[in-house]
Amino acid sequence: MRKIFGNCLPHPQTLASWYKCVGGNAGFHDEVFSGMKAEASGQGKLLCSFMMDEVAIRKQLDFDPAGDKFIGHVDMGTAVEDRAALPLANEALVFMVVSLTESWKVPVGYFLIAGLQGDERANLVRLCLDKLYAVGVHVVSITFDGCSANMNMAKVLGASLDMKSLNSTLCHPSNPNLDVAVFLDACHMLKLTRNTLAEKSVLIDADGNKIKWEYFKKLQELQCSEGLVAANKLTERHIQWHRQKMKAKLAAQTLSSSVADALEFCNTQLKKMNLKVAMPL
């Protein structure tokens, strides 16, 4: 019909997009699980990685005319009699699944929160792993950032990221024979390491040597005064990191091997920085 009438009618894909209805409410999205179940039916199972992170949102109350309700309060995807009594959410906790064998990733749900304890996060992760396993998705790893709530969540789930009792795997709640590896997000951990060193000024390594933020400042001052850069990307932006604390690139360049080599060169060859202790890296 579309060809006969000279493309006056909408394309079939346009009609399909008009016809479909995907719920965007907080909680787990059944449409996503249905789609992954159909994908897994042809392959037997899907090997995926599970990722979670918080996204900062503005505290704001809006009215949704379609649902005839106010949105903006804490919402875990369950029915609540008096939602107005709940505080306004300032974060959205997002769960995402990434395929390890194919090129796709999809969010499976989100929750509007105003702070969530480790045991509460663990319950949500268990529920998500169970729902994924039921549709044929085998999660082999979990990735999250290094905030204290996530570290407590890992302990509740059976893993431990403490160096004295390191256990980087946990048992799958739906299949005890399936181990799930636990990873800390590398970019976030780099930023945490840089922030800790810059704010505390001095850290002590395993051998008792001092690692000082002053080393980086002196290296930058030396490069500015000499007008030369010792084969590194250290600039004033890296020293004044508070203005761009979310940029992982600055943290990675600050704690890079090139900066460590420059510090070692200045200490052993130029003797201009008066560094009497071990290098920071």
Image (cartoon, grey):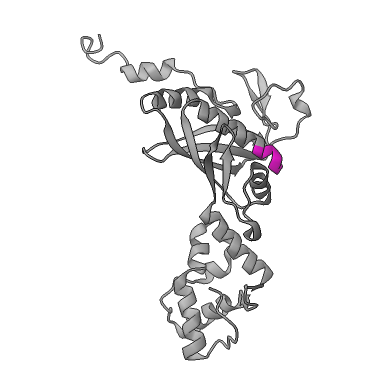
Q: Residue at x 51, y 68 (%)?
A: 254
Report the residue at 61% width, 53% height from top: 146
Considering every residue shown, the one lying at the far right of the view is 85
Residue 71 x/y as whole percent: 66, 27
* Residue 134 locus on image (x, y percent): 52, 26
Main secondary-structure element of the magenta-colored stretch: helix
- Relative to 277, residue 5 above or below: above
**Residue 17's image quarter?**
top left
Q: Residue at x 49, y 37 (%)?
A: 139
Residue 198 lies in the magenta stretch = no
**Seen in the image, is 120 located left or right of residue 263?**
right
Which quarter shows the N terminus?
top left
Relative side of 61 to 138, left or right: right
Q: Is residue 200 above or below residue 262?
A: above
Nearest the camera: 81 or 150?
150
How many circles with numbers are drawn on the protein? Answer: 0
Q: Can residue 80 be seen at all in this image of the molecule?
A: yes
Q: Which portion, as a residue range, is magenta? A: 116-122
174 over 245 or under it: above or below: above
From the top left corner, tell me how far across and down residue 239 is, in percent: 57, 70
Q: Nearer the viewer, residue 230 or 71?
A: 230
Tell me the quarter of the picture where residue 162 sits.
bottom right
Locate residue 93, reporting x and y percent.
61, 38
